[in-house]
Amino acid sequence: MIIEVKKLSKKYKEQTAVHPLTFSINKGSCVAVLGPNGAGKTTTLQMLAGLLTPTSGRINFSHLSKGDMRSEIGFLPQHPSFFNWMTASEFLQLSGQLAHIRKNELHAKIDEVLNFVGLTSAKKKKIAGFSGGMRQRLGLAQAIIHEPKLLILDEPVSALDPQGRRDVLQLIQSLKGKMTILFSTHILHDAEQVCDDIFILKEGQLKWQGKLDDLQEEQHSINLKLTVERNVAQHLDHLSTINDYRIVDDTTAFIHIQHQTEGTQILSALLKNGAVVTHYELVKESLEDAYLKVMEL
């Protein structure tokens, strides 16, 4: 375990941005903080990064040096700022000096991280001429130049086009195993591509935590798509075991069931009652359906 958070909260006057949160993060894991805009993701990450003082609660760091843990944390804000008159190399020179990287090591380190994020050819180019994707990759380079044990990324791909999103997510994937990664996003697909575990926040409250596979399993449900020749509602009304279904039209309905065996029992009962069944299909809910269920709790 690298982080243990207990009853962490943040208030601004009378408004509570983050309600008491309790969770832990394992060393070497890649964790996504999911939730819509305004869920408290940025506030939570800034408290973990040491950039914002919590109102209450505590954050315990293990595997990090005693004292100021910020020296072993890399942070990329949602909207990173740069000195546009600098080149990429000059900006990383400044970042490395602020991170107290030894002068005789810094030049090689700059070349290494620029190569990793794919900006070697832009090394001497002014940041003012960088695209959004290039700026995000440069921001990632400054966050990892000092080889942090914990990397925190706030919405790292939210403002990028599809190509830029893919590039940055691939870079995050490449960093897995080298450091513990915590990143926020409001897009489930981003988390699904790279993370091991997720936290789901809504209105500053922790709604769910665990592995993605467990989310789908815990919120698991099956719908039975059923088509008969006619009067599907009438046929279903005669079955006392069914109380959760949706009529599509005169012939088709979706029936919510808990287990596949229920579908077989329903089919048998319909045939026994004289229904002419023309289509029978079990439709499992997607991961997105499971996520939306949690958000509605």
Image (cartoon, rainbow, N blue to C red):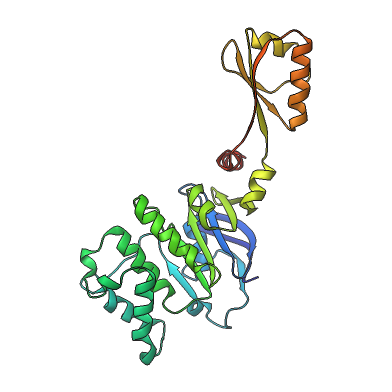
Residue 204's spot in the image, x, y percent? 55, 52
Residue situated furthest bottom in the rendering:
104
Numbered disc total: 0
Residue 268 seen: yes
- Is 16 rendered above or below residue 72? above
Residue 32 against residue 123 in the figure, above or below: above
The quarter of the rendered structure image containing the N terminus is: bottom right
Residue that extends furthest to the front in the rendered view of this protein: 278
Q: Nearer the viewer, residue 27 or 269?
A: 269
Instruction: Tell me the quarter of the image containing the C terminus.
Output: top right
Q: Measuring 48% from the left and 79% from the top, which residue is drawn there? A: 71
x, y percentage for residue 93?
Answer: 32, 81
Residue beneath the point at 64% across and 61% down: 23
Q: Is residue 211 left or right of residue 84?
A: right
**Could you tell me which residue is drawn at 39 percent across and 68 percent down?**
140
Which residue is painted at 36% across and 50% down in the image? 162
Can residue 239 be seen at all in this image of the molecule? Answer: no
Q: In screen coordinates, is 217 left or right of 273?
A: left
Residue 211 or residue 226, whichever sits in front: 226
Q: Quadrant of residue 259?
A: top right
Residue 29 pos. (x, y %): 59, 65
